[in-house]
Image (cartoon, helix red, strand yellow):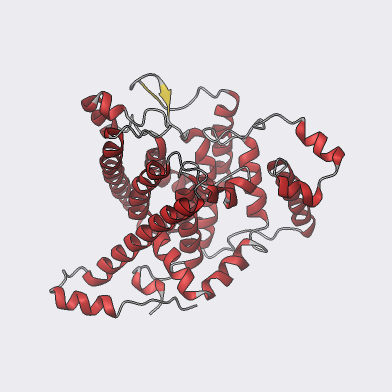
Amino acid sequence: MNVSAFVKIPGRDLRVDLARGVALTLVYVDHIHGNYLSDYTLQRFCFFDAAEVFVFLSGLVSGLVYTSCHLSTGFGACASKALNRCSQLYLAQICLFGLSCLVLYPFAARGVYLPSDNLYSFLETPLPSVWAALTLAHAPGLMCLLPLYIVLIAFTPFAIALLCRRAEYLLAASVVIYLVPQFRPEVTLYFNYPSLRPWSFNPFAWQLLFVLGMLIGSRKARGLPALPNVPRWMIGTSLIGLAALLLLRCGDSPAFARLIHTRALRDCLSQLPHPLPFTRKSNLELLRIVHFLLVISVSRFLVSPVLSYALRLKRLASGFIRMGANSLPVYVVAVPISYAASALTLGSRGNRPLMTLVTVAGFALMLATAKLVTFYQASRGAGSPPRGPRVLLAKWKAFPNHVSR
């Protein structure tokens, strides 16, 4: 049995699930405070990180799913599907807030506090914090991603309706909306709890990345090539740009310096401000999105072959595919796990064995969550309830541990 069969979505692109599973893992690793393993993730070598990958892939999947729905059943069914998904995301956000509080409270009771703004307001003002979480006004730390998705999915049916008529109009409107917070950073979603402050991800900026993914997914849904043919000169230019951005991003790395730096180049790089301008994450500033688009422009020749090859590593790929196929429940579990891992290793930055052990243990819990959700979906079949513990045990033993190509 292949992975497409047990996720119950015919024709599912396993490469997308694989990429989302890897992105979830990178998000988890990057958000353990003081984790030395984050020196080997995307954010160390690129001006973007796994969050951009995840939002883009979510847009791609949304474009594929909602375009098919719009073309087959019309706008009303598409809007109903989006509303149902928003309700799922909202419930997941509430569960995420509750689980995070349950994890953070025992450590806070022992005097262990993580360095994050407004993360512990539920201890200072419990009732206002709960009310603000229910209204999505309070989404501190890693809890800020799902509110962004709720906004993006809410406008997806309208974007798809425009996309199916004049895709260039949707892209132009998205670019204009993106440029507004670049010139006026205060344009964002503000709330008055506990003080006037924006969401960590500005929807007016991040919608551009989602729309770009949506355009590609919509093309696939209509039987068109995901990406238009890119001239060779553009690929060469993109590779040169990627090399230059890699040099800027890793210029302070001693190992990188020993490989290619000259004294003149090192002196030049040392004069650059740190952090570099146009790299702030909240508004998805220009250097971040340009770097990501350069990677997308060469993805057909670099990223897609890597993902296709990774699918052949069956046992390794199957775990990431399960996580990508069940990204919402895995994310809800991964965030509290990252908080627990950060609290357990707080003050042990130099203790690499402990950090490795905690990171691997958390990753194992994420894999277990994905497998449990997949098993639950498989056990219910076409909607029928499980028929007893013996049947479930037999299905568990027969559960596929491999991925076919």
Q: Is residue 251 visible?
A: yes
**How many tags in the picture?**
0
Q: Residue at x 42, y 60 (%)?
A: 324
Q: What is the quadrant of residue 249 in the picture?
A: top right
Q: Is residue 380 left or right of residue 69?
A: left
Nearer to me, 121 or 383 = 121
For residue 375, above or below residue 263 = below
Residue 261: image x %, image y %? 81, 46
Quadrant location, the N terminus: bottom left
**What residue is drawn where x is 24% and y is 31%?**
130
Does residue 148 lie above or below 124 as drawn?
below
**Taking the image as drawn, is residue 63 in sight?**
no
- Left or right, 16 with respect to 104, comes to right
| Residue 109, horizontal then vertical, whole percent | 26, 33
What residue sits 45% from the left and 52% below the top?
354
- Of residues 213 and 313, the one drawn nearer to the viewer in this rendering: 313
Which of the pair 67/329 is nearer the observer?
Answer: 329
Query: Horizontal and vertical percent for residue 328?
Result: 35, 53
Please give the name of the residue rendered at 62% of the width and 61% of the height, measured from the top-left corner: 303
Left or right placement of residue 233 versus residue 395 in this view: right
Q: Quadrant of residue 192?
A: top left
Q: Position of residue 174 (x, y in %)?
A: 54, 38
